[in-house]
């Protein structure tokens, strides 16, 4: 039994994920999209955070939390040039699909995200600015799926075709009292 002490800072993660943000109440962000397309999934709001909805043995479903669909897009915020992943409500995601004719060609489009009202869960709307940035002025398109797995403390091995491992590990993370099953 040994301990590996060193006189240097801990190593950085191999692929640090982009910050996941939500447009604040009364927020108005001008964003240059960097992803080619949206990513969308079901989530639950459990323990004051948003966690993924699982296809099997979902802890959020188990405690009766409704499934809320969320979509994610990446972009550079004009005000501070930060590259972010922005959580979109279903309404905002549909706005984007209606405004941009090719839903897998989002990259480079400049859009405004506006949170109406004084509540952090006020209606989020998206309007397009009718202009684009050339791709070489943007950071590379991130792998949104990989980033979301990382944000949720999961890895690609959790995305087997049957999702068993994915469900199992997330269930254990969210509910420490659950015991691993034998299967
Ligand atoms: Zn669920």
Image (tube, rainbow, N blue to C red):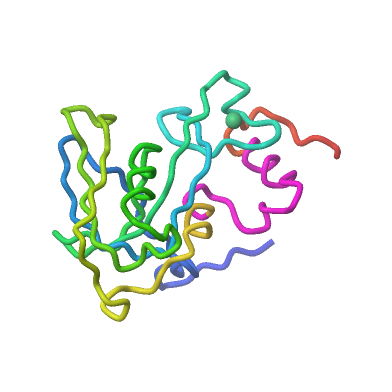
What residue is rendered at 41% in x and 50% in y?
Answer: 72
Residue 126 rendering spot, x and y as whole percentages: 26, 46
What residue is rendered at 30% in x and 81% in y?
Answer: 136
From the image, give the main secondary structure of the stretch colored magenta.
helix
**Where on the picture, by quarter, is residue 73?**
bottom left
* Of residues 110 and 118, the one drawn nearer to the viewer in this rendering: 110
**Where on the picture, by quarter, is residue 173?**
top right
Q: Is residue 5 rendered to the left or right of residue 78?
A: right
Magenta-highlighted residues: 150-172
* Of residues 139 and 136, the one drawn nearer to the viewer in this rendering: 136
Residue 9 rendering spot, x and y as whole percentages: 40, 69
Residue 89 rendering spot, x and y as whole percentages: 37, 38
**Which residue is outermost to the right?**
183
**Count of marks overlaid on the render:** 0
Q: Looking at the image, is 164 positioned above or below residue 85?
A: above
**Which residue is outermost to the bottom?**
136
* Of residues 156 and 169, the one drawn nearer to the viewer in this rendering: 156
Residue 162 rendering spot, x and y as whole percentages: 76, 47
**Magenta-drawn stretch contains 165:** yes
What residue is rendered at 51% in x and 23% in y?
Answer: 66
**Magenta-drawn stretch contains 87:** no
Q: Looking at the image, is 47 positioned above or below residue 180?
A: above
**Which residue is outermost to the top?**
64
What residue is rendered at 44% in x and 68% in y?
Answer: 12
**Where on the picture, by quarter, is residue 168?**
top right
């Amino acid at each position: 039994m040994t301990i590996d002490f060193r006189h240097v800072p801990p190593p950085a993660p191999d692929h640090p994920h982009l910050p996941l943000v939500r447009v604040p109440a009364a927020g108005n962000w001008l964003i240059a999209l960097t992803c080619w397309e949206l990513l969308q999934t079901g989530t639950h709001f459990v323990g004051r955070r948003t966690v993924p909805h699982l296809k099997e043995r979902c802890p959020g479903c188990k405690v009766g939390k409704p499934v809320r669909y969320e979509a994610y897009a990446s972009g550079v915020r004009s005000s501070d040039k930060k590259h972010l992943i922005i959580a979109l409500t279903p309404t905002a995601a549909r706005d984007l699909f209606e405004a941009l004719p090719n839903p897998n060609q989002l990259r480079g489009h400049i859009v405004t995200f506006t949170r109406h009202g004084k509540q952090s869960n006020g209606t989020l709307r998206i309007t397009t600015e009718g202009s684009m940035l050339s791709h070489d002025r943007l950071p590379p398109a991130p792998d949104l799926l990989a980033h979301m797995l990382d944000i949720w403390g999961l890895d690609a091995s959790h995305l087997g075709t049957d999702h068993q491992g994915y469900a199992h590990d997330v269930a254990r993370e969210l509910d420490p009292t659950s015991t691993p099953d034998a299967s």
